[in-house]
Image: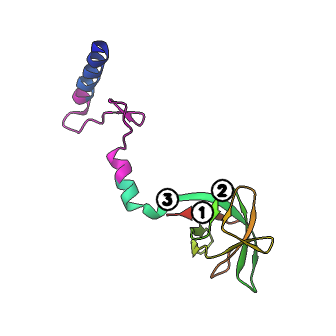
């Protein structure tokens, strides 16, 4: 144990010498010296300022039915009634809350990888657009 402490002390001294007056980032990968998960200050700032950027790709638009404003999605992830999605379009993202979802014209609460679902949206979206789970 003393060997590890000596090595870590040497690393800290070297880093503080190299960085001058700057704060020393004591992370190795994303584990700190105590083996605890850590997040850098830059990552925290990015997370605070870009919360809407927390998007997980859950599928792709296969078809848009313009008469009823329903989008047919092919899922590559899990989607639940109540989730909020964003669909990328040329005019910017279209955000919608999944109030109901259907597979083969039957209401479902949850859909998963490989399912083809229908969801009502407010505006037209293009086929091939990516669909993201947000929040």
Q: Quadrant of the N terminus?
A: top left
Q: Which mark is residue 72?
A: none
Answer above or below: position of 32 versus 3: below
Q: Which mark is residue 77?
A: 2
Determine the residue positioned at 73% across, 68% down.
117
Residue 38 within the magenta-colored segment of the rendering: yes
In this rendering, position of residue 9 left or right of residue 65: left
Locate residue 85, reporting x and y percent: 58, 68
Locate residue 67, reporting x and y percent: 76, 86
Q: Which residue corresponds to mark 3?
A: 54
Judge depth for marks 2 and 1 and give the one in front. 2
Determine the residue positioned at 25% across, 33% down.
19
Q: Are marks 3 and 2 in contact (CB under 8 Å)?
A: no
Q: Are marks 1 and 3 in contact (CB under 8 Å)?
A: no
Residue sitting nearer the eye, 122 or 79: 79
Q: Which residue corresponds to mark 1?
A: 132
Q: Which residues are magenta?
A: 16-44
Give the crowd class for mark 3: few <14, some 14-19, many >=20 residues within 10 Å: few
């Amino acid at each position: 144990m003393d060997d590890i402490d000596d090595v870590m002390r040497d690393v800290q001294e070297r880093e503080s010498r190299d960085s001058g007056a700057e704060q020393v980032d004591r992370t190795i990968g994303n584990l700190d010296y105590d083996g605890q998960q850590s997040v850098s200050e830059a990552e925290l700032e990015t997370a605070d300022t870009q919360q809407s950027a927390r998007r997980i790709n859950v599928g792709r638009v296969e078809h848009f039915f313009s008469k009823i404003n329903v989008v047919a999605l092919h899922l590559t992830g899990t989607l639940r009634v109540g989730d909020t999605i964003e669909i990328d379009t040329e005019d910017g993202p279209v955000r919608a809350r999944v109030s109901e979802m259907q597979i083969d014209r039957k209401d479902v609460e949850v859909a998963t990888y490989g399912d083809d679902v229908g969801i009502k949206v407010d505006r037209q979206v293009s086929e091939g657009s990516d669909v993201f789970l947000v929040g």
